[in-house]
Structures are given as structure tokens and as C-alpha cells.
Image: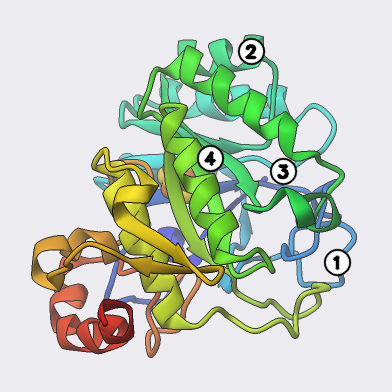
């Protein structure tokens, strides 16, 4: 068994639902009936949370037989497949088997693995199976709150893993997942993003989304204006700016110091991550979009974004 996001299943014609914005990547998740052995406080997959195990963030991921996916996936022209791991016994070996099965079926699309730290040997094995990018589930941007939220991990384990990932997959092919709004402050978040870029990796930016049954279910989503600031900072860091060229720190607050024209930096507000990763509505309702999954949707909201970032510009 495996899980697939509801948008991916819809695109594969395996559920009776139609979505206006379709995923450009097919999102798969390892199956575990009791959930993931990690205890991340925000994640419904954690076996320590009381959530419905069909969910990751606000999206249902129904369980389905891998063979059903394998039989259909060749008919749809996804630009990428993303396999997300859960912490359970032998999850690495199972991930190898899933990728081998997808490859045996003749699928040659680019493949990402999203994972918590694994050994260098495992990374080389993924690479030999044709994985071209990895997503690193670091999630928490502050060392101060890391161990409280991302149980049982320590932040240093992730920094070492990012280094290994860049060595094995080369710069710009390692995408570090960071969730804004878990209780870190803006300076911590921006500095962590800068460190990721300094190491030759990239940031895949997420907004915190409270999910029923998790210990953080009553935690609020971040203010949209503050999230836009992080998107703008990420955008400029990915274009080789240094943090001190993008913002000033005044009274423990970040102040933008470059002139921003929304039309010129539109891509800052699209979903960030591996090429062709758009994660439609993964951490937002269609009425309040944090990461835009398509340029057409973004174009419609340009004026709205301009208003949302107005405060940052004065
Ligand atoms: S950035 Fe997107 S495609 Fe890449 S690992 Fe993360 S979720 Fe998967």
C-alpha cells in the first residue's frame, strides 16, 4: 500500500473529483497504518497525534495499492514524482522498492525523495535509482524550539544531512522544507534560510497549517504579510543576495531595504521547491493563498499581494 495526495489521485482518474488547479507533480507518501514513528507536533502523520492518518497538512492522502498507481501513472504526463517517506522500520528499503517498481513500469520522469536524515550510502542508492532531488524535512527554523517541536530530532542532525545531500546530489538539488509560523521569530527564520543557501541547498517554503488532532491544532496560521516577507527574502537569497542586502534589523524586526516591484518578483509568491513542485492548496484554503500553485492564479491576485506587502514597503 501507498498513499497519494487527493489531487494526484484525481489527476490519475482514481477518484471521482475534479480540481481547477492540478498538481504538476505526482505526490506519493509511504503508508503506515499507525503513522510515522516521529513525534512532530504539527504533523497528522505522527503516531503520537490523534489525527486522521489520511492527512498531511490539510490534504487527504488516501491509501491505495502501489500497483493501481503504477498501472495509471504512465497515462498522465506528470513533470515529476515526489515520494515522501515516514519513519518506520525498513522505510529506506521500502522506498527503494517503490522507486524500482515505478522505474520498471517505464517511468522516466524526474523523481524527488522527501525524507528525514538517512545515511550517505542510502542517498547514493537513491541517486543510482534515478532520484535527482531530495527534500529535507527539517521543518523547524529555530534551534531554540527545534527539539520541542520536531521530536526526537536535533537540529544539527539536519545541518549535517543537508551537507551530505549537497555532496551527493550537488548544489541546488537539495530542497530544505521550512515551515513558517511554528513559534520561531523572523530573524531566526530568515537566518536559517540564509544558512541553507550558503550551504548550496534551496528552501521549500511552507506556511504553518493547524490540523485537527495534532498538539498544535489551535495554533494560528501566520499573518499573510509576514509570510510574504519570508517569500521575498527567500526569492532574493535564491538569486544570490545576502540577507544583509535584503533587510535591516531594527528593534528585533526585519525591515525590507530593497525596492520591491511585485510585477518584477512575481515568482517569489509561487510555491517554492523542486522543479515542477506546485503542491496546490497544501497549506491554504483557496480563499487565502500563501503559496500560489499556478501563474494564472497568481496573476489574478497581483493587486491583493500588492496590498498585503504595502506595510513592508514603508
Ligand atoms: S519540494 Fe516538493 S517535490 Fe521536492 S521534495 Fe519537497 S514536496 Fe517533494
Q: What residue would you read off at disc 2?
A: 120
Identify which residue, 249 or 95, lies in the foreground.
Answer: 249
How many neighbours does mark 2 have within 10 angstroms: few (below 14), some (14-19), or many (20 or more)? some
CB at mark 2 closer than 8 A to ligand 1? no
Q: Is 112 situated above or below 20?
A: above
Q: Quadrant of the C terminus?
A: bottom left
Up-down: is 240 above or below 108?
below
Residue under numbered circle 4: 83
Mark-to-mark CA distance, 3 and 1: 14 Å
Label 1 belongs to which residue? 49
Mark with earlier residue (2, 4): 4
In the picture, which quadrant includes the N terminus?
Answer: top right
Please give the residue where the numbered disc 3 appears in the rendered image.
Answer: 86
Q: CA distance from mark 3 to mark 4?
A: 10 Å
Mark 1 or mark 2, which is nearer the start of the sequence? 1
Find out whether the residues at labels 3 and 1 contact each other: C-beta distance under 8 Å: no
Q: Nearer the viewer, mark 2 or mark 1?
A: 2
Q: Nearer the viewer, residue 66 or 82?
A: 82
State whether residue 27 appears in this view. no
Disc 1 secondary structure class:
loop
Does label 1 or label 4 sit earlier along the sequence? 1
From the viewer's perspective, tell me whether residue 298 is left or right of residue 37. Answer: left
| Distance CA(mark 3)–CA(mark 2) | 18 Å
Sequence-wise, the earlier of marks 3 and 1 is 1
From the top left corner, tell me how far across and down residue 257 is, in percent. 27, 63
Estimate the spatial distance between the alpha carbons at disc 1 and disc 4, rounded to whole Å.
Answer: 22 Å
Amino acid at each position: 500500500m501507498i498513499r497519494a495526495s487527493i489531487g494526484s489521485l484525481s489527476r490519475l482518474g482514481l477518484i471521482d473529483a475534479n480540481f481547477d488547479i492540478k498538481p504538476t507533480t505526482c505526490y506519493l507518501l509511504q503508508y503506515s497504518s499507525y503513522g510515522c514513528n516521529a513525534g512532530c507536533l504539527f504533523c497528522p502523520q505522527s503516531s503520537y497525534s490523534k489525527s486522521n492518518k489520511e492527512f498531511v497538512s490539510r490534504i487527504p492522502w488516501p491509501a491505495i495499492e502501489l500497483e493501481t498507481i503504477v498501472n495509471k501513472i504512465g497515462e498522465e504526463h506528470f513533470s515529476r514524482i515526489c515520494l515522501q517517506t515516514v519513519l518506520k522500520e525498513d522505510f529506506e528499503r521500502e522506498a527503494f522498492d517503490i522507486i524500482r517498481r515505478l522505474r520498471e513500469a517505464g517511468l522516466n520522469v524526474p523523481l524527488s525523495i522527501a525524507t528525514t536524515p538517512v545515511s550517505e550510502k542510502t542517498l547514493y542508492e537513491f541517486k543510482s535509482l534515478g532520484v535527482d532531488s531530495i527534500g529535507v524535512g527539517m521543518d523547524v527554523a529555530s534551534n531554540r524550539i527545534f527539539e520541542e517541536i520536531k521530536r526526537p530530532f536535533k537540529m544539527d542532525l539536519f545541518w549535517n544531512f543537508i551537507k551530505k545531500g549537497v555532496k551527493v546530489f550537488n548544489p541546488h538539488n537539495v530542497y530544505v522544507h521550512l515551515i513558517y509560523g511554528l513559534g520561531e521569530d523572523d530573524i531566526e527564520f530568515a537566518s536559517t534560510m540564509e544558512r541553507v543557501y550558503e550551504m548550496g541547498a534551496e528552501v521549500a517554503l511552507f506556511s504553518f497549517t493547524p490540523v485537527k488532532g495534532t498538539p498544535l491544532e489551535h495554533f494560528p496560521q501566520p499573518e499573510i504579510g509576514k509570510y510574504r516577507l519570508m517569500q521575498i527574502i527567500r526569492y532574493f537569497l535564491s538569486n544570490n543576495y545576502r540577507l544583509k542586502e535584503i533587510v535591516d534589523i531594527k528593534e528585533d524586526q526585519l525591515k525590507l531595504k530593497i525596492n520591491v516591484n511585485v510585477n518584477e518578483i512575481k515568482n517569489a509568491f509561487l510555491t517554492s521547491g523542486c522543479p515542477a513542485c506546485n503542491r496546490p492548496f497544501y497549506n491554504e484554503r483557496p480563499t487565502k493563498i500563501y503559496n500560489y500553485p499556478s501563474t494564472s492564479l497568481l496573476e489574478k491576485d497581483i493587486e491583493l499581494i500588492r496590498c498585503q506587502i504595502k506595510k513592508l514597503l514603508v
